[in-house]
Amino acid sequence: MQNHHHAAGAFLHRRRGWRSAAFLAALLATAPLAAQAPVSVDATAPAPAPRSDHLHLGTGTGPGGTLGVNSRYLTRDGKPWIPVMGEFHASRFPAAYWEEEILKMKAAGVNIVATYILWNHYELAPGTLDWTGDRDIRRFAELCRKHGMMLFIRPGPWGHAEARFGGIPDWVVAATATRGNDPAYMAEVERFWRGLYGQLRGLMWKDGGPIMGFQVENEYNLVGAGQGREHIAALKALAVKIGFDTPLYTVTGWDQTVYPRGEVVPVMGGYMDLPWAASPKQLPPNENHAFRFTSRVSGDLGAQTKGGRRGDADDDIENTPFLGAEYGGGLPVMYRRRPLMKPIDVSAAITTQIGSGVNLLGYYMFHGGANPLANGRTLEETQRSGGYNDVPAIGYDFQAPLGQYGEVNPVSGALRPLHYFLNAYGDRLATTRLYQPAVVPRDHLDLQPLRWSLRGAGDAGFLFVNNHVRLYPTPAHRGVRFDVKLPGGSLTLPSAPVDIAPGASFIWPVNLDMDGVRLSWATAQPMTRLADDKGPIHVLAATAPGAVELAFDAATVASLSVPSTRDAGGRMIAKVTPKAAPVTISVTGKDGKTVRIVLLDQAQAGKAWVGDAFGQRRLVLTDADLFFAPDRMVLRQRGSGDFRFSVWPALASPKGSAPIARGRDGGLTATVPGAAPRTLPLTLERTPGEAPPIAIGGPANAAMQPLPEAHRAAGAWGFTVPQDALAGASDAYMEIDYRGDVARLLDGTTMLDDAFWDGRVWRIGLKRFASRLGHPWTMTVMPMRADAPIYLDEVARKQLPATGQVAEIKSIRLVPEHELVVTQ
């Protein structure tokens, strides 16, 4: 299946012959369903023993414990470990709010904060590094330590990150031969890295700090004198000489990356669309919705340079664990391509990659941000500055789980159950081997066969299914059962055939040990494990409407609190239908101890939060956004002050910043007073003119964003946000419904934010602009031409006229964010 990946990546850059995405969609829609023969997998081959003597990495032991790396997985204090890592750039977010954003990431199940330290964000003038304010990287690291979050640093020197020159300052680009062992360049890198180390001294893992990893360069595939493996080796040696001694050194492993094997470990990634592609058309089905059995490398992740040979990562599979660093938590909106991500687009791809063997789930981005200015200059990547892409000057929302202004986006609810699963059961998953089913798709373009995998160790494991592909219909698979051949004998599950609907994506357990009770299988996804004074609680989430089947090994069960039947294999089969409130099932083991299962339906799983609150790990179900602090839980909600939430294990006597009452269903309710949403009056200050035709050119030979002078054609609307917009609120958001090409928000001549229109309402948080409230603001909208050679998803394209152009603001709403603080 994986032999097609590199060919697919080449197509996307070179636009080789593809009949058309529309043709493929029509073909798939009319194709008959494949016959539903039994699906099977042989999982009897043992996993290879892990080894680590060939890896030359840094010091893994410190006051916080021991971190290790072997050929198959990461370890923490000697135990297998699958962390969740999320990218968040300190320099792209106001320092005043770093702490609560780190807590939001932790509440979403993230264990490691990854951060690019973009050189040109910190060196604003030649030879002067600025570590103050939003650039105070030491304070950022210390906040991670304070809240038990590890930190993985990515200091380039070339980072990309949609930054000008990949983050290398203009004067370094002008004066040296970058991205190689040119002595002048390496001297500049050493100066930058020594300055950084001066800020982070004493914060390495071995010192009791949070810094557990260091990425060397990024997307590096250059070969030649002073380049290739030689350059990566020189950079790592420089980092070690300076003092960056970390348990893990990595390089990105895609796009024909080369590196000195054994000195660094490759990390992988994948995105659900390719906004850096040149084509203005819908792309073929994305490979990240297909399971990987022979390669870990995605075909195209947007490297700015072209490798001239096979990369090293695929040849290093037997020596290195499958680690991820850049699985898309969303996607950037670039000028020529503006794809929109639905939550299932992201969660289905992540489920598939975990099911392909990923043993470190790393996201880029997990938290959006805003590009800083450098003495009035913008620092974004543009084609006219030699980059491959045009991105907004300021906006870097990335459609991420946490947005540019810290708002929790719907994709968070789709991903959190996966993170909590890895937090609770990752030690078991890490040691598994990936097994390929007997029948698999021909390649990632083949949508007809069922897509699934098994990760197993001995007689236990997890079964992964994905029947979702972004923008393409997948067939219903009717009457499915899985035949799993294990060392101890075959298992066929579930007890009766089930239908797998288009869009389904899930994980099922196989022979899961639940504190002495063996769950032979469940048509539900394990989510987390809790405990109280009555014993352990395992939380499972239904993966389809209707009854969930739970099959228990009768040899481990004395009694069940729900009716069950016996199958021919001696298993106790229970069918439980989720209800409006979570269902609790008690299982008494043969040892007399009780294990409880809390069963959620699909909607409840998307409202679930898991974290440490008041000295205990708890599950909270709520429509509100939430994060945990040591002495409180903070719930936030846009537009409504009516809060409803449930907590397991229950809070004995919850108190709140507003009175908390118990509802009829045992849940908790509170009403926080505050302003209601309102619409702001607008004044047309400048009528839109005629937008010039979009130029084609640049390194991508594709649509280029308008020149600055072209914005004279933009329409302008004036409005004022009341000075009291934040009164009684944790924040307030402007929700701007507009149509056009490029939008800019200005206070006088100061640009506060900008965006390329993609069909969404533009949401802007106001608390960071508190000192500017009450000023007359202006929003400009560059007209979008109907003939623009720009890719938009169909949902956006339908909002545009068939001919001519459009530049309009339909409305600007002011929506307060209400906050409830819960204490015990």
Image (cartoon, rainbow, N blue to C red):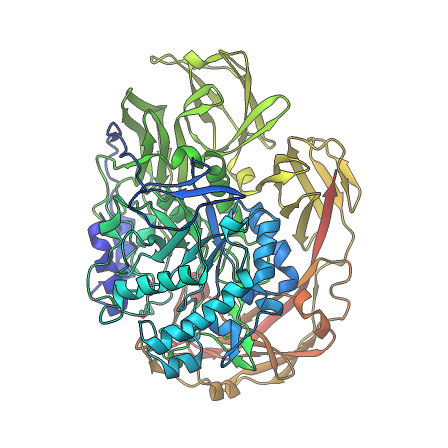
Question: Which of the 4 image quadrants contains residue 406?
Answer: bottom right
Q: Nearer the viewer, residue 200 or 35?
A: 200
Is 175 displayed left or right of 615 in the figure?
left
How many numbered marks, from 0 up? 0
Q: Position of residue 12 (x, y in %)?
A: 27, 64
Residue occupying image coordinates x 31% and y 72%: 181
Is 154 displayed left or right of 285 in the figure?
right
Q: Position of residue 137 (x, y in %)?
A: 56, 63
Q: Nearer the viewer, residue 185 or 544?
A: 185
Is 797 displayed left or right of 19 in the figure?
right
Question: Which of the 4 image quadrants contains residue 639?
Answer: bottom right
Q: Residue furthest front?
A: 241
Residue 603 visible in rendering: yes
Q: Position of residue 14 (x, y in %)?
A: 24, 69
Instruction: Decide: is 10 above or below 211.
Output: below
Instruction: Decide: is 465 above or below 679.
Output: above
Q: Position of residue 404 (x, y in %)?
A: 56, 63
Residue 392 visible in rendering: no
Instruction: Decide: is 590 above or below 259.
Output: above
Instruction: Decide: is 283 above or below 144.
Output: below
Q: Which quarter of the figure is the C terminus placed in?
A: top right
Residue occupying image coordinates x 48% and y 89%: 709
Question: Which of the 4 image quadrants contains residue 778?
Answer: bottom right
Residue occupying image coordinates x 29% and y 53%: 297
Q: Nearer the viewer, residue 293 or 407?
A: 293
